[in-house]
Amino acid sequence: MAGPRTTAKVKTTSTRKAQTARIEVQIVARYRAKVKPSVLRKAAQAALDQQRIKRRVEMTIVVTGNAQLRALNRAFREVDAPTDVLSFSATDQPGPDTVYLGDVVISYPQAREQARSGGHPVEAELQLLVVHGVLHLLGHDHYTEAEKNVMWKAQAVTLKKIGAALTEPKLN
């Protein structure tokens, strides 16, 4: 991801499943006890599987606070407000055998508030945001109704497959 990096200390963990994905998870210390990296990795891998990604890929998932998402949103989208998730597709590649998809950056406070508003667990909201972010890295978008329908269907199928408590965004 281009742009500012968080200065807060983060814990980094990674895994590789079926040699298709290396998913690094970085969680700011403040939220580390509230977020299970394995849940985020499982959601990301499920999105890759649902989209039939067979090549070796890498990505990073970052869970941070509103200030970081607001700064990124302002810098890259010219929106001076926090948001729930941003995806940054990579331009540089680590090597010929691996594709670095990019970074998915999630605001834990936004996820917590959306979960509270929607009446579902924060973990389910985080799963939705990871899947949503990964789908963006893979080229999905939701600017038109047709794009949105395709993306929302992919999200629902992926979330159902992993047994998430939430399978589609709850719009208020």
Image (cartoon, helix red, strand yellow):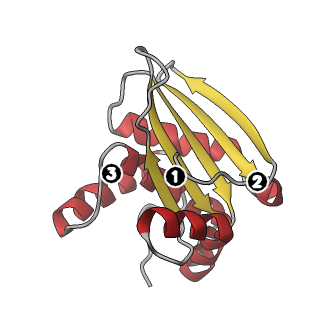
The amino acid marked with disc number 1 is Val
In the rendered image, which residue does mark 2 sit on? 7
Residues at marks 3 and 1, CA–CA distance in whole angstroms: 13 Å
Between circles 3 and 1, the one closer to the viewer is 1
Q: Which quarter shows the C terminus?
A: bottom left
Between circles 2 and 1, the one closer to the viewer is 2
- x and y percentages locating residue 166 in the rendered image: 50, 63
| Mark earlier in primary sequence (2, 1) | 2
- x and y percentages locating residue 61 in the rendered image: 59, 46
In the rendered image, which residue does mark 1 sit on? 130
Residues at marks 3 and 2, CA–CA distance in whole angstroms: 34 Å
Residue beneath the point at 57% across and 54% down:
105
User: Toward the viewer: 65 or 68?
Assistant: 68
Whether residue 36 is visible to the viewer of this picture, yes or no, is no
Residues at marks 2 and 1, CA–CA distance in whole angstroms: 22 Å
Residue beneath the point at 65% across and 70% down:
66
In the rendered image, which residue does mark 3 sit on? 154
Tag 2's secondary structure?
A: loop
Tag 3's secondary structure?
A: helix
Task: Decide if residue 151 is on the left or right side of residue 27.
Answer: left
| Mark earlier in primary sequence (3, 1) | 1
User: Toward the viewer: 159 or 12?
Assistant: 12
- x and y percentages locating residue 58 in the rendered image: 51, 30
The amino acid marked with disc number 2 is Thr
Residue 44 vertical position relative to residue 156 in the rendered view, above or below = above
Find the residue positioned furthest to the bottom: 172
Question: Are the two marked residues, 3 and 2, in contact with CB atoms closer than 8 angstroms?
Answer: no
